[in-house]
Amino acid sequence: MAAKELLFVEEDGTLGFGDYTLTSKTKLDNFEFAGDIYKVKTFAEITKLEKNGMFVYESVPGSAVGHFKEAAEGVSFEVAAAEDVQLTIGLEPESEYMVVLNGTSAGAMHTNLSGKLSVSVELGTDERATVKVEKC
């Protein structure tokens, strides 16, 4: 999944962002989408997305994300990277979420006091995975 740009709107109206092939940190800010302002920082070591100055997504190492959709009940997206990634997603504080990776349940997980949920995704070179996180 090669990124068209650092931050863009997919054909289905969702967001795409990130480029793990970059060797130096690159950012794009003041990207307006659905009335919100987004900022992305990305390269081989990390990809981070913020909305209206608030944390939304981070991966270590960097990743490319497609079809990113936020809803009241959670988030869903596709992620690709050169290797396994550790994802951190901003959600509601101290809440329980069901995590589904590639259609298989990874079980229920809890967010911390700041609303962050961490998930590991096993990927081979340039593989992609679907991630769905829904509030229980």
Image (tube, helix red, strand yellow):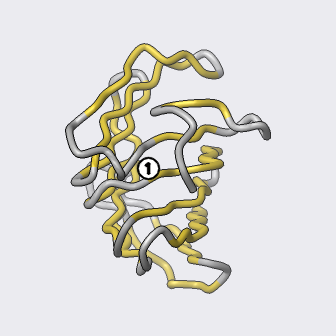
Tag 1 residue: 92
Secondary structure state at the residue bearing disc 1: loop
132 lies above or below 36:
below
- Give whichever of 96, 4 is nearer the camera: 4
> Which amino acid is tagged 1?
Glu
What x and y, as percent, mark residue 126? 48, 68
What x and y, as percent, mark residue 129? 56, 71
- Give whichever of 43, 102 is nearer the camera: 43
Question: What residue appears at the point 30 percent right and 35 percent down from the top-left corner?
Answer: 41
Question: What residue appears at the point 36 percent right and 75 percent down from the top-left corner?
Answer: 120
Question: What residue appears at the point 47 percent right and 51 percent down from the top-left corner?
Answer: 64
Mark 1 Cα-neighbour bin, 10 Å: few <14, some 14–19, many ≥20: many
Left/right of residue 97 with respect to residue 28 in the rendered view: right
What x and y, as percent, mark residue 117? 36, 62
55 lies above or below 76:
above
What x and y, as percent, mark residue 133? 56, 64
103 lies above or below 1:
below
Left/right of residue 39 with respect to residue 64 in the rendered view: left
The quadrant the N terminus occupies is bottom right
